[in-house]
Image: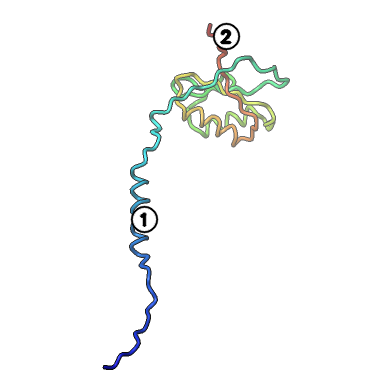
């Protein structure tokens, strides 16, 4: 009887099934996690306690009505397009973009109209944009 020594084989660890299990666990935990619903977030807007000190320069006032219409220094614009607001701000600024801009928006005005007014005033070159608020003391 001839006995030949058997070759010793190195043990192999099959990583494929381990990777599959870990990947399935990651997918399971990603799908099982509950995320915060944005619709459930309650937002409390800040209220101003005191009025700011009077500035030496007269600010440019952009008024946004409840219907989303714009007025620049209480002058009604021809239409509500971005180009018209841009042209009106450039005309009022007259190249002096160091003046502050105050946006007075109605509480029922569309949020997009306020954001558009902020965006256009930044594109014209104004660097100081303020949003007017109602003091809580005035409401009482």
Q: Is residue 5 left or right of residue 127?
A: left
Residue 54 drawn above or below residue 36: above
Residue depicted at 62% across the width and 26% down the height: 101
Percent position of residue 71, x then y: 54, 22
Quarter holding the N terminus is bottom left
What crowding class fits label 2: few (fewer than 14 Cα within 10 Å), some (14-19), or many (20 or more)?
Answer: few
Residue depicted at 37% across the width and 65% down the height: 15
Residue depicted at 36% across the width and 46% down the height: 29
Of 31 and 98, which appears nearest the observer? 31
Which mark is on residue 23? 1
- Mark 2 sits on what residue? 137
Q: Is residue 99 left or right of residue 34?
A: right
Dot 2 lies on which element? helix
Q: Residue furthest front?
A: 1
Residue depicted at 37% across the width and 51% down the height: 26
Which mark is on residue 139? none
Of 23 and 122, which appears nearest the observer? 23
What crowding class fits label 1: few (fewer than 14 Cα within 10 Å), some (14-19), or many (20 or more)?
Answer: few
């Amino acid at each position: 009887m001839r006995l030949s020594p058997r070759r010793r084989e190195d043990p192999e660890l099959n990583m494929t099934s381990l990777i599959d299990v870990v990947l399935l666990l990651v997918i399971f935990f990603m799908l099982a996690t509950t995320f915060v619903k944005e619709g459930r977030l309650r937002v409390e807007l800040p209220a101003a306690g005191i009025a700011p000190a009077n500035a030496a320069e007269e600010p440019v006032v952009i008024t946004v009505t409840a219907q989303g219409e714009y007025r620049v220094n209480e002058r009604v614009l021809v239409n509500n397009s971005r180009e018209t607001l841009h042209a009106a701000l450039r005309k009022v600024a007259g190249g002096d973009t160091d003046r502050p801009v105050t946006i007075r928006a109605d509480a029922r005005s569309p949020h997009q109209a306020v954001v558009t007014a902020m965006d256009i005033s930044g594109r014209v070159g104004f660097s100081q944009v303020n949003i007017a608020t109602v003091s809580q003391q005035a409401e009482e």
